[in-house]
């Protein structure tokens, strides 16, 4: 293999430049990266959490919070069930009330329709006879 020429070296440098990130791309990457202060703060928070979780008091505090939330959820579910039952009862009473008013009105309308039908049946033959005579 022969020694590289200056032209080979120049072409290699140009190829490397095209493959390298631009300054703008590097700045964008730097802005996305966490700073040393942020990393330090995260490490500190993680250490605090680990130490809290490692102690019995820390675990007990979490258990107490979970128990409290469980109690609240149970209470809320009971209230929701009671509200649903009350709503169902209210709708049943409303249905009975409406049906109580609608049934007599419905019967009266049916009676009036039957009466009108009888009147029409009685007047039709007379109207036909009158047409035949005319």
Image (tube, rainbow, N blue to C red):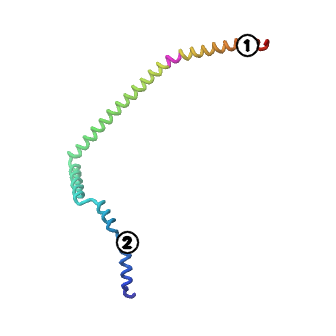
In the displayed structure, would residue 108 be above or below residue 18?
Answer: above
Asked which quadrant contains residue 71, the reply is top left
Give the overall secondary structure of the magenta segment: helix
Q: Identify the residue position indicated by label 2 in the image.
A: 19
Q: Nearer the viewer, residue 20 or 47?
A: 20
Left or right for 103, reference 21: right
Magenta-drawn stretch contains 100 = yes
Residue at (54% x, 16% y) in the render: 105
In the displayed structure, would residue 66 be above or below residue 95?
Answer: below
User: Dot 1: few (<14), some (14–19), or many (≥20) neighbours within 10 Å?
Assistant: few
Magenta-drawn stretch contains 63 = no
Percent across and percent down for residue 47 are: 22, 54
Asked which quadrant contains residue 44, the reply is bottom left
Percent across and percent down for residue 18 are: 38, 72
In the displayed structure, would residue 14 be above or below residue 5?
Answer: above
Image quadrant where one finds the N terminus: bottom left
Asked which quadrant contains residue 68, the reply is top left
Image quadrant where one finds the C terminus: top right
Residue at (36% x, 81% y) in the render: 10
Left or right for 132, reference 21: right
In the displayed structure, would residue 72 be above or below residue 94?
Answer: below
**For the magenta stretch, what is the residue range?**
99-103
Q: Identify the residue position indicated by label 1 in the image.
A: 127
């Amino acid at each position: 293999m022969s020694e590289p020429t200056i032209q080979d070296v120049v072409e290699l440098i140009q190829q490397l430049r095209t493959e390298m990130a631009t300054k703008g791309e590097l700045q964008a990457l730097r802005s996305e990266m966490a700073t040393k202060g942020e990393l330090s703060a995260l490490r500190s928070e993680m250490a605090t959490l680990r130490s809290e979780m490692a102690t019995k008091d820390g675990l007990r505090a979490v258990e107490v919070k979970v128990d409290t939330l469980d109690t609240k959820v149970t209470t809320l579910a009971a209230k929701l069930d009671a509200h649903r039952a009350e709503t169902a009862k209210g709708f049943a009473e409303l249905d009975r009330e409406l049906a109580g008013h609608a049934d007599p009105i419905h019967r009266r309308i049916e009676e009036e329709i039957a009466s009108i039908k009888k009147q029409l049946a009685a007047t039709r033959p007379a109207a036909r006879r009158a047409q035949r005579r005319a």
